[in-house]
Amino acid sequence: MNTTMRTLLAGGTAAAALLASGVAAHAATTATATASQAATAYPAYKKPAIFGTSFQADPGHDFTKGIHSRHNGILRGWITDVRDGVAEYEPIKWKRSKTTEGYFVGPPEGDVTAYASPIAKDVVFLSAYGCKPVMAAMTVDRNTGLGAKRCPTSVLVKRHDKQRQPSLITVYQGKIVKVQEIYTP
């Protein structure tokens, strides 16, 4: 009986030591992952209505001081030009149509509502049409209608510099950190 008790205690102690070392190793791995995410992370901003019918405001933005970055947050918009790693972009809204479901439009001609921000070197680009320059594949989250395929920055620059693609553009600390395309049939 005494031997059985000693065996159980020794086994329990060994299991506790193994569990503690595993928990410590997991905690160290989690702490390292969390620290690396914190270095490149940005706050979780509230997404605007994807098919919103009005332009999003940027309170406090002074458009008379030339084109510059939008405040932190997510803008429903499209990139109109990319030069030397800086993207110019403007807000868009959904316009209903009598003959189709509708389409996105930007501000009217002559409107100065536009922004310019550098594209972050580690920008997250989620495509709705695949990673090839020609938009042939559909890579969309079926629940949201937003791009789900992560593609390189080079695809973002090539695609969005040539055509206006509706997207959710996330700006953090004056840089574009995420672009998620909106699928439009």
Image (tube, grey):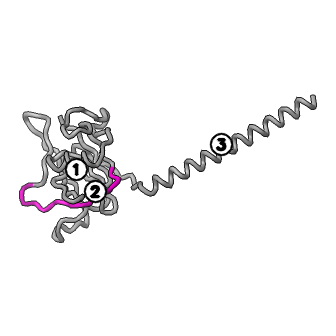
Q: Position of residue 12 (x, y in %)?
A: 78, 36
Q: Reading the chain from its start, which is encountered first: label 1 or label 3?
A: 3
Amino acid carrying mark 2 in the image = Ile
Asked if the magenta segment contains residue 109, the reply would be yes
**Residues at marks 1 and 2 touching, judged by CB atoms closer than 8 Å:** yes
Choose between 132 and 70: the one closer to the eye: 132
Disc ID at residue 119: 2
Q: Residues within 10 Å of mark 1 (few under 14, many from 20)?
A: many
Quadrant of the frame with the C terminus:
top left
Q: Position of residue 133 (x, y in %)?
A: 20, 40
Amino acid carrying mark 3 in the image = Gly
Asked if the magenta segment contains residue 64, the reply would be no
Q: Label 1's element?
A: helix
Q: Residue at x 30, y 62 (%)?
A: 174
Q: Is residue 152 above or below residue 65?
A: above
Give the labeled residue for mark 1. 157
Q: Residue at x 24, y 45 (%)?
A: 155
Which tag is nearer the camera, tag 1 or tag 3? 1
Q: Which residues are magenta?
A: 108-123
**Residues at marks 1 and 3 touching, judged by CB atoms closer than 8 Å:** no
Q: Reading the chain from its start, which is encountered first: label 3 or label 2?
A: 3
Q: Label 3's element?
A: helix
Q: Residues within 10 Å of mark 2 (few under 14, many from 20)?
A: many
Disc ID at residue 22: 3
